[in-house]
Image (spheres, helix red, strand yellow):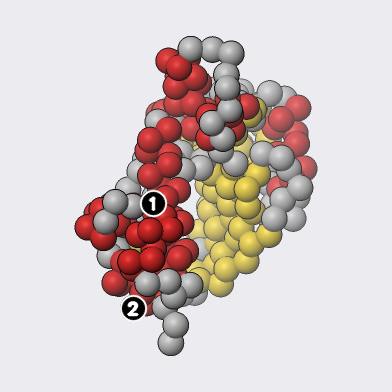
Amino acid sequence: MEFIFDERESDSPLVDLVWQTHSERDGSFISTAVSRCEMVITKYKGQVTFTVRGPETKATHVQYPADAEFFGIRLKPGAFMPHLPTGELTNNGIDLPEAPRKSFWLNSEAWELPTFENADVFIARLMRAGMLVHDPVVDAVLQNQPLDMSLRSAQRRFLRATGLTRGTFEQIERARQAVQLLEQGTSIADAVYHAGYADQPHLTRSLKRFVGQTPAQILRTDGPK
């Protein structure tokens, strides 16, 4: 990928990461499965697009043009926009309508486009307006904490907030853990054990689905040189 990439942590309790990148030339890459929702601002040939993207349950090939700018705000698990059903965003994205003077329409109101530098301020405004919320049930479910509700109610809350079932969410996170291990030079056998897979074929099937590569391909590309 011909990308100039930059990222930073956020002070917001609902944001996992803030990033920005610029493509020097056109090309393609494998977009891996993700368990988080994300807001992405794209600038290309004078046009600015604000996209809200849901989780992705499989790896896909993505084309990108030369000289395009991308800026994103990756949300933490359980953070979502209640007026944009997360289930409808899964493996999908919604482009919000453009408004005058570098702004966009969100719930019948014009909002100024955020920047890499003021993303935390933008998120705080969304939270105050009730446009971005967090469901604590998601954290409780992921941490196996007791809940004062039925299992079915917890499952509905989890699906509403994340756009995923708990099983799919954890499969994606397990695959990401396995990739990190392999990129650090961990052997395939040890990655199987530490990431909790039943055997090597199980790991291979998972990574081909969620990452678009086999364990051997990841080791060959990212392992120690």
The quarter of the picture where residue 138 lies is top right
* Residue 220 numbered tag: 2
Mark 2 vs 1, N-terminal side: 1
Pick the front one: 126 or 111 = 126
The reply to whether residue 21 is visible in this rendering is: yes
Q: Where in the figure is residue 172, as x and y percent of width and height? A: 40, 47
Amino acid tagged 1: Gly
Q: CA distance from mark 2 to mark 1?
A: 22 Å
Q: Where in the figure is residue 216, as x and y percent of width and height? A: 29, 72
Query: Is 99 placed left or right of 204 in the picture?
Result: right
Secondary structure under badge 2?
Answer: helix
* Residue 196 numbered tag: 1
Query: Is 150 placed left or right of 139 in the picture?
Result: left
Establish if 27 lies above or below 88. Answer: below
* Residue 210 numbered tag: none
Query: Is 28 placed left or right of 146 in the picture?
Result: left
In the image, what residue occupies the spot 44% across and 22% down? Answer: 155
In the image, what residue occupies the spot 42% across and 78% down? Answer: 223
Amino acid tagged 2: Arg
Q: Where in the figure is residue 108, as x and y percent of width and height? A: 61, 23
Q: Where in the figure is residue 60, as x and y percent of width and height? A: 31, 54
Pick the front one: 16 or 121 = 16
User: Local crowd at mark 2 within 10 Å, few (<14), some, or many (≥20)?
Assistant: some
Pick the front one: 17 or 83 = 17
The reply to whether residue 31 is visible in this rendering is: no
Pick the front one: 116 or 156 = 156
